[in-house]
Image (spheres, rainbow, N blue to C red):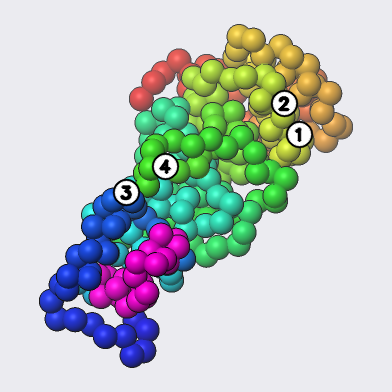
């Protein structure tokens, strides 16, 4: 609370009028600067009004200069709102796109700016900083204050192969890739942006092994990226398994295990 801010004991008419303005503007989540902009010429004491309404628990403070209505708890919208140049991504995006039924208690947010992980209204947020060149494949879901940015299906798959520790497990990623309808042109675009050769080889092998429809151009592209270094298929798995020379991969998840994962649902 700002030093010297007057906190009224009861809800004043001005505070009621301020909330009616938010209703009229259909604003449920906002920055202090956004409030000052819409209230310009109407309310001159926005800071004091917001402090009073937060004190009365009519508004909730998310973090410094960021607020929402007390009943607003859209976790994805909040996650994308609090970080600059951000999007819901990784395991959270897999779940949002219906590619996994496994649900994480953590909301994963990709951003090009550093931001410390934090808990907001009891929900844990993991902020994953990536290079600006990796910021692509982003769409919007939801409407109004409930709208949020999220990586599309192809970028979500690419991101999870790029940083599989945020995917919810490699078996889930295999299953998601099997279930996803993928655009080869988008996959090529996002592979170029992310520029992770090992990840491209893993996706290329898996897409070819699964014989996914319409992905021949992507497989041809992925084969042009194969280098001389062998990589583990599951980067976090044991250093064992069959060597696949044309993809320069070691299958520490066997072909039989891949089939079991994709054929057996939850």
Lower position in the chain sequence, tag 3 or tag 1: 3
Q: How many marks?
A: 4
Q: Percent x, y for residue 156?
A: 56, 35
Which portion, as a residue range, is magenta?
34-54
Residue 95 vertical placement versus 34 (above, below): above
Residue 105 vertical placement versus 35 (above, below): above
Q: Percent x, y for residue 68?
A: 33, 59
Question: Label 3 belongs to which residue?
Answer: 26
The reply to whether discs 4 and 1 touch (Cβ–Cβ < 8 Å) is no
Secondary element type, mark 1:
helix
Question: Label 2 belongs to which residue?
Answer: 188
User: Is-magenta flag for residue 65?
Assistant: no
Q: Residues within 10 Å of mark 2 (few under 14, many from 20)?
A: some
How many angstroms separate mark 4 from mark 2 (CA)?
Answer: 28 Å
Secondary element type, mark 4:
loop
How many angstroms separate mark 3 from mark 2 (CA)?
Answer: 40 Å
Lower position in the chain sequence, tag 4 or tag 1: 4
User: Is-magenta flag for residue 40?
Assistant: yes
Seen from this angle, which residue lies furthest front?
Answer: 41
In front of the other: label 3 or label 1? 3
Q: Percent x, y for residue 191?
A: 71, 32
Secondary element type, mark 3:
loop
Relative to 189, 59 lies left or right: left
Question: Label 1 belongs to which residue?
Answer: 192
Mostly what secondary structure, the magenta segment?
A: helix
Relative to 246, 78 lies left or right: left
In front of the other: label 4 or label 2? 4
Question: Label 4 belongs to which residue?
Answer: 147
Residue 17 vertical placement versus 146 (above, below): below
Lower position in the chain sequence, tag 3 or tag 4: 3
The reply to whether discs 1 and 2 touch (Cβ–Cβ < 8 Å) is yes
């Amino acid at each position: 609370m700002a030093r010297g801010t007057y906190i009224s004991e009861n809800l004043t008419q001005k505070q009621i009028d301020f909330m009616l303005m938010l209703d009229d503007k259909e604003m449920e989540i906002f920055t202090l600067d956004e409030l000052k902009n819409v209230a310009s010429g109407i309310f001159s004491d926005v800071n004091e009004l917001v402090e009073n309404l937060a004190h009365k628990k009519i508004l909730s403070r998310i973090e410094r200069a960021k607020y929402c209505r007390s009943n607003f708890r859209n976790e994805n919208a909040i996650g994308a709102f609090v970080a600059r140049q951000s999007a819901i991504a990784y395991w959270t995006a897999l779940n949002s796109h219906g590619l996994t039924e496994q649900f994480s208690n953590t909301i994963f947010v990709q951003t090009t700016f550093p931001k410390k992980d934090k808990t907001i209204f009891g929900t844990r947020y993991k902020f994953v900083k990536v290079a600006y060149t990796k910021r692509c494949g982003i769409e919007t879901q939801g409407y109004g204050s409930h709208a949020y940015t999220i990586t599309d299906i192809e970028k979500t798959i690419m991101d999870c192969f790029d940083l599989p520790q945020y995917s919810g497990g490699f078996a889930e990623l295999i299953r998601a890739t099997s279930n996803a309808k993928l655009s080869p042109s988008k996959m090529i675009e996002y592979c170029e942006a992310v520029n992770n050769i090992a990840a491209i080889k893993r996706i290329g092998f898996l897409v070819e092994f699964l014989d996914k429809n319409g992905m021949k151009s992507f497989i041809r592209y992925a084969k042009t990226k194969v280098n001389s270094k062998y990589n583990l298929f599951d980067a976090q798995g044991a250093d064992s398994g069959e060597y696949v020379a044309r993809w320069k991969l070691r299958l520490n998840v066997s072909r039989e295990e891949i089939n079991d994962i994709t054929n057996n649902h939850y």
